[in-house]
Image (cartoon, rainbow, N blue to C red):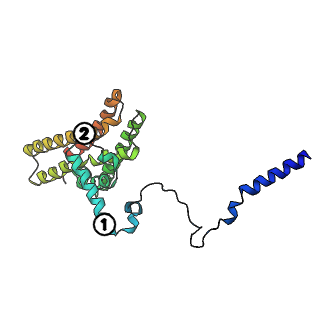
C-alpha cells in the first residue's frame, strides 16, 4: 500500500508541474528556422583582391614601381627591411643581363662573338650570390635563401652604373687619364655596393660571425669590379 501511495503522489506532482505547458503555443508568425554563424573577424574588400582579377597593365606597373623603390633603397643605403620583406628577382635579373651585355665584346674575346664572356658574367654573378647565401645560412643567418639573392642582386646596381660610365669614358679614348677616371668610379661604386649589401644583411647574422659573412661579399663585388675596370673594347 505504501508503494502504491508513493506512485500516486509522484504522478500527481508531474501532472501539476507540466499542466501549464499545455497552453503554450508557437505563433506561425515567428520564424523557427535560421542559420547560426560565428564571426571570425572583420571582412574587408582587400580579402577578395587577387592579381588574377586585375588588368595586366596594373600588375606590370605595380611590379615596376616595387623594383624602382628597391633601386632607390640601394642608391641610398640604410638599414631597412624593404628588400627583405618584399623580395623579388626581377631587378637582379635585369641588372645581371645589362652588366653582361655591356661587358661582352671586350678585347679578351675578340676572336668570337662575345658569347662566352656573357656566360661568364652571368654565371659569376649568380653562382657567387648562391655561394654567399649558403655561407650566410651555414653561419646561422636568419635571412631566407631568396631574400639574400635579392639583396646581393640589387646591390649590383652601383657597379652597373660604373660599367655604363666606363663605357662612356672609353668612347673618348683609352689612356692614363681615362684609366684614372675609371679607377675612381669603379672603386667608389665597389664601396657603395659593399656597404649597401652589408647594411641590409648585417642584422641577420650573429654578432660574432659578421666578419665571416662580409668577407665573401667583399670578394664577390671585387671580382665584378675587376672585370669592369679591366674591360677594354675591341
**Residue 145 placed where, x, y %?**
40, 44
Q: In the displayed structure, does residue 37 sit left or right of residue 51?
A: right
Within 10 Å of the Cα at label 2, are there few (<14), some (14-19), or many (20+) other Cα atoms?
many
Image height of 42 relative to 24, above or below: above
Figure quadrant of the C terminus: bottom left
Residues at marks 2 and 1, CA–CA distance in whole angstroms: 34 Å
- Name the residue furthest bottom: 28
Q: Is mark 1 on a helix, strand or loop?
A: helix
Q: Is residue 159 visible?
A: no
Image height of 105 relative to 129, above or below: below
Residue 58 badge: 1
Q: What element carries label 2?
A: helix
- Name the residue furthest top: 208
Residue at 30% across, 35% down:
202
**Toward the viewer: 191 or 146?**
146
**Residue 63 placed where, x, y %?**
30, 59
Q: Name the residue under label 2.
A: 194
Image height of 132 relative to 18, above or below: above
Foreground label between 2 and 1: 1
Within 10 Å of the Cα at label 1, are there few (<14), some (14-19), or many (20+) other Cα atoms?
few
**Residue 23 placed where, x, y %?**
67, 66
**Toward the viewer: 10 or 26?**
10
Work out whether mark 2 precedes mark 1 in sequence or the reverse, and give the earlier one.
1
Residue at 81% across, 50% down:
9
Image height of 136 relative to 86, above or below: above
Amino acid at each position: 500500500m505504501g508503494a502504491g501511495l508513493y506512485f500516486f503522489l509522484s504522478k500527481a506532482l508531474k501532472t501539476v508541474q507540466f499542466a501549464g505547458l499545455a497552453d503554450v503555443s508557437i505563433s506561425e508568425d515567428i520564424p523557427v528556422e535560421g542559420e547560426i554563424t560565428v564571426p571570425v573577424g572583420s571582412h574587408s574588400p582587400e580579402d577578395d583582391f587577387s592579381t588574377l582579377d586585375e588588368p595586366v597593365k596594373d600588375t606590370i606597373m605595380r611590379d615596376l614601381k616595387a623594383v624602382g623603390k628597391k633601386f632607390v633603397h640601394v642608391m641610398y643605403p640604410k638599414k631597412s627591411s624593404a628588400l627583405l620583406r618584399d623580395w623579388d628577382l626581377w631587378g637582379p635579373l635585369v641588372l645581371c643581363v645589362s652588366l653582361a651585355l655591356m661587358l661582352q665584346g671586350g678585347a679578351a674575346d675578340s676572336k668570337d662573338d662575345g658569347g662566352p664572356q656573357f656566360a661568364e658574367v652571368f654565371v659569376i654573378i649568380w653562382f657567387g650570390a648562391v655561394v654567399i647565401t649558403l655561407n650566410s645560412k651555414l653561419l646561422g643567418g636568419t635571412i631566407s635563401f631568396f631574400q639574400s639573392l635579392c639583396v646581393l642582386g640589387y646591390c649590383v646596381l652601383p657597379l652597373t652604373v660604373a660599367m655604363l660610365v666606363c663605357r662612356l669614358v672609353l668612347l673618348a679614348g683609352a689612356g692614363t687619364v681615362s684609366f684614372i677616371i675609371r679607377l675612381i668610379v669603379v672603386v667608389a661604386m665597389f664601396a657603395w655596393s659593399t656597404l649597401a649589401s652589408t647594411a641590409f644583411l648585417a642584422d641577420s647574422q650573429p654578432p660574432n660571425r659578421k666578419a665571416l659573412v662580409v668577407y665573401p661579399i667583399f670578394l664577390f663585388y671585387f671580382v665584378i669590379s675587376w672585370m669592369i675596370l679591366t674591360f677594354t673594347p675591341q
